[in-house]
Image (cartoon, helix red, strand yellow):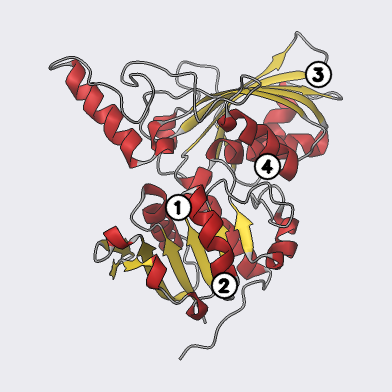
Amino acid sequence: MGYRVAVVGATGNVGREMLVILEELNFPVDEIYALASRKSMGMEANYGDKTLIVQDTAQFDFSKVDLVLMSVSGAFSKEWAPRIGAQGPIVIDNSSAWRMDPDVPLIVPEVNPDDASYAHRKNIIANPNCSTAQLVVALKPLHDISRIKRVVVSTYQSVSGAGKAGMDELWDQTKAVFMFGASEPKKFPKQIAFNVIPFIGAFDDDGYTNEESKMWNETHKMLDPEIALTVTCVRVPVMVGHSECVNIEFHSQMDEDEAREILRDAPGVMVVDKRDETGYITPKEAQGEFAVYVSRIRNDTTVDYGLNMWVVADNLRKGAALNAVQIAQLLHDRGLIGRKVLA
């Protein structure tokens, strides 16, 4: 027997990807519903060879489903996730609304699967920020062997992290550059075509952005609050796929050869690290893939126990939809989803 599953936000980039990955991973589904806002009612969404008609979230009876995958705004999730959870299903939420709530587990299955044990406190599980997800998948196996002292991260985040509007803006500006000159930015604060923007989210009082603070707060919650972590987040003119330059300082010995072997055996990680001009992964190559790719692994000789590496993943997959479905699979494997009796 499978589950009754609803995908809320099914017309967005991540919602559509959730439907694709549920089918790709053969997650046990008996009934599936595509939900979105009222303005999207009647639109179509695909699940395998089925065409789903999108329904209005506000009119849907969530008491008849076992599991809800949600990719909506934080404000919408703040209002709706508790209401849905109170009706019985577990909500796996992709927004930032619940990530730091102490009664809501924040989960990357390769990193902290045991935190699923308290999912029923609110019937909500949080999906981490897309950049955090790939980072902790790469850090966890190294931290298990030689504790991490400090991490310095610079991100190179694709426009799909800002949704369809971000992708459209890059596409339109790129075309316009060759015709009339770049159009005025709307989604981003400055031109994104042929440019990079060292600003994502909103500024906090300390000069960091909330995108940067998400990364260290979420890493501390999932991995280890003792790790010192500093981040600079940058938007780049790439459609899909986030990249990260990661500098790690350990408490004890960890050299590049040991790190390479540890990562090769780590769940969810693919090492592509040859010292030639093509021996690394770019976001274009990671697009559509499940793995977190690690390349350019090398010693940092400026500290006693230092390492540099390059981490790349498809932000719509491991950074969002795939991780959500993997959480669902984790719940299934541990018997944590309550099946409702099918009428």
Mark closer to the observer (3, 2): 2
Q: How far apart are marks 1 and 4 (CA)?
A: 35 Å
| Residue projecting furthest to the right | 252
Residue shown at the point (84%, 23%) measured from the top left: 253
Circle 3: is it few (<14), some (14-19), or many (20+) Cα within 10 Å? some
Mark sitting earlier along the chain (1/4): 1
Residue shown at the point (60%, 72%) measured from the top left: 86
Residue 201 in view, yes or no: yes
Please indicate whether residue 146 sits to the left or right of residue 62 in the image. right
- Per the image, the residue denoted by label 2 is 89
Q: Distance between the residues labelled 2 and 1?
A: 17 Å
Q: Kindly check if marks 3 and 2 are in contact, taking CB atoms under 8 A apart as contact.
A: no
Looking at numbered disc 1 in the image, what kind of residue is underneath it? Val
Mark sitting earlier along the chain (3/1): 1
Q: Is residue 51 above or below residue 169?
A: below
Mark closer to the observer (2, 4): 2
Circle 1: is it few (<14), some (14-19), or many (20+) Cα within 10 Å? many
Secondary structure, mark 1, is loop
Residue 282, position as x, y percentages in the image = 45, 27
Q: Distance between the residues labelled 3 and 4?
A: 21 Å
Q: Distance between the residues labelled 2 and 4?
A: 35 Å
Looking at numbered disc 4 in the image, what kind of residue is underneath it? Asp
Q: Is residue 59 above or below residue 191?
A: below
Residue shown at the point (50%, 16%) measured from the top left: 276
- Per the image, the residue denoted by label 1 is 72
- Per the image, the residue denoted by label 4 is 265
Q: In this view, does 41 lie above or below 270?
A: below
- Per the image, the residue denoted by label 3 is 305
